[in-house]
Amino acid sequence: MPKDTLTVKDNRTGKEYEIPIWENTIKALDLRQIKVTDDDFGMMSYDPAFTNTASTKSAITYLDGERGVLRYRGYPIEQLAEKSDYLEVAYLILFGELPTKEQFESWRYDITHHTIMHENIKDFIHAFRYDAHPMGMFISTVAALSTFYPEAPNIHDPNNRLIQIQRLIAKVPTIAAFSYRHSRGLPYMYPDNDLSYTGNFLNMMFKMTELKYEPNPALERALDVLFILHADHEQNCGTNAMRSIGSSHVDPYSAMAGAAAGLYGPLHGGANEAVLRMLRAIGSVENIPDFIQSVKNGDRRLMGFGHRVYKNYDPRASIIKKTAEEVFEVTGRNPLLDIALELEKIALNEDYFIERKLYPNVDFYSGIIYEAMGLPATMFPVLFAIPRTVGWLAQWQEMLGDSEQKIARPRQVYIGPEKRDYVAITKR
Ligand code: CMC
C-alpha cells in the first residue's frame, strides 16, 4: 500500500526516518530529527537562492514553468489580458474573487479618490538631483509615505490595512509620474478622476498645456494589458523581499520600498531597460550573429531571455508580442522590433539556448512597446513596480494571515575560521 511518506536512511548511523510528504514537498524542519549524536543541531537543507525551497503556501498565483502556464486566483492570464482590466485584476488578486458590479464601482471609487499625494511629497521629490533615476525616486518616495501615515504600522487591523493598500495602489502612478516629470524638469500634473487608472497615469505623465488630456484609447488599453501581465508573479525576488521585510511587522510602505528595490536590479524588473540598451548596442540585424556568439562565449547575457521558473515560452511574452502590433499601429513601428524578432528567431534555433531552455521572458518585448509609447527606458522598472504593487500587497496580507509564518530568518552553514584569539594591531 503506497504511503505519502519519504523514508530516509542516514548512512552515518544506519538509522531510518519516515518523513511525511505534503503536496510533493517535505518540511525542512522534519530533517532536524536526523542526528549523529544527541547534542547535534540536526540536519538542515542547503538551498542558496531558494531554487528548490517553497517559503510559503499561497493561493494567489499559479505558475507552471515547464508548460508556460500563469493564472491569477485560477483565471488564465490570457483570459484576463483579453477580457478584464487592471483594476478588476487588482481586486481579484487582493480579494480572491472577481468583483460584482457594485463591488467594482466602489473599489474603483476608492482607488480613484486616493490618487492625490500630500503636497510635501512634491517638495521631497523636488529635492532629488535633476538627473536622478526615476526608480531611485520611486523607491525613496514609497518609503517616505510611511511618515505621512502614522497609523500605518497598525498592520493587525484589517480596516487600517485596507486603507494603506488603497493608498498605495492609488498613489504609485502619481509617484511614478512625478518622478518622471522631475527628471524632465516639467511641472507636476495632478490626477484626473474622470480617467481610468492607466488613462490618468498617461495624463500625469504627458499632459502639457491642454485643458483636458485625452489618452489614446489603444495606448491606454495596451498599458492596461501590460499592467495586468505584471500584477503578480508568485515568489520572485521583489515579492520575497516584501514578505521577508513584512515578516518583521513593519508598515507596508517600508516593506514595499524594499520590494521595489529588489525589482530595480537588472536581473529582475530592470531587465527591460537592459533589453533596450542591448538592442540599441546591437544596432542592426547584421550584428546579431556576433552578438549571439559573444553570449555563447559567456561574455554577456541575452537580456530578456531565460527565467528561473519558465523553462518554456513565458506566456506573458506571447501576449505582449500581440500588444506590440496594436501599439505600433498607432505609434509607427519601433525599428528595434526587427532586431528583437530576428534575435529571438536565431536564439531559439541555437543549441546553447535550447539546451538551457532559455526563451523570451516578459521583458524581452515590453521595453520596445514602452519606448514606442514615448516612455523612456529609465521609467521601465517604475512601469513594472506600479502594477506589481497589488501583487506585493496581496502577498504581504496573505503572509500576515498565515499562522505558519514567522519572522523570516534563514539558517546558514558556517564555513569561517574556528575560534581564535584577538591579536593586537602592533603584533599582526
Ligand atoms: N543569456 C545567456 N545565458 C543565460 C541567460 C541569458 N539571458 N540566462 C541564463 N543563462 C545561462 C546561464 O549562463 C547558465 O548557463 P551555464 O549552465 O552554462 O552556467 C544557465 O543558463 C542557467 O542560468 P542561471 O543563471 O543559473 O539561471 P537563473 O534561474 O539563476 O537565472 C535569470 C534566471 C532570469 C536571472 C537569468 O535567466 C537571466 O539573467 N536572464 C536575463 C535577465 C532577464 O531577462 N531577467 C528578467 C526575468 S523576467 C522578469 C522578472 O520576473 O523579473
Image: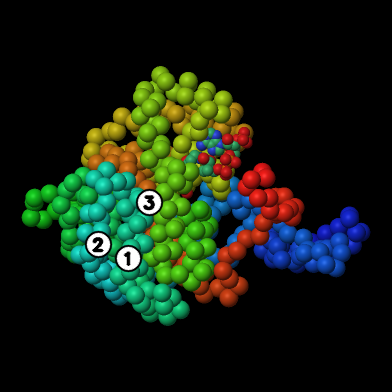
- Looking at the image, which is closer to me, 259 or 364? 259
Q: Residues within 10 Å of mark 1 (few under 14, many from 20)?
A: many
Residue for point 24% across, 45% down: 130
Q: Is mark 3 within 8 Å of ligand 1?
A: yes
Would you say 271 lies left or right of 31 here? left
Identify the image quadrant of the C terminus.
top right
Identify the image quadrant of the N terminus.
bottom right
- Looking at the image, which is closer to me, 146 or 56? 146
Residue 213 coordinates in the image, percent (x, y): 14, 53
Disc with the residue nearer the chain's start (2 vs 3): 2
Whether the residues at callouts 2 and 1 have beta carbons within 8 Å, the answer is yes
Whether the residues at callouts 1 and 3 have beta carbons within 8 Å, the answer is no
Q: Which residue is mark 1?
A: 145
C-alpha separation, residue under disc 1 versus residue under disc 3: 19 Å
Q: Tell me, what colour scheme is on the image?
A: rainbow
Q: Is residue 141 visible?
A: yes
Q: Amino acid at mark 2?
A: Ile
Residue for point 30% across, 70% down: 148
- Residue furthest toward the front? 426
Label 1 residue SS: helix
Q: Which residue is mark 2?
A: 121
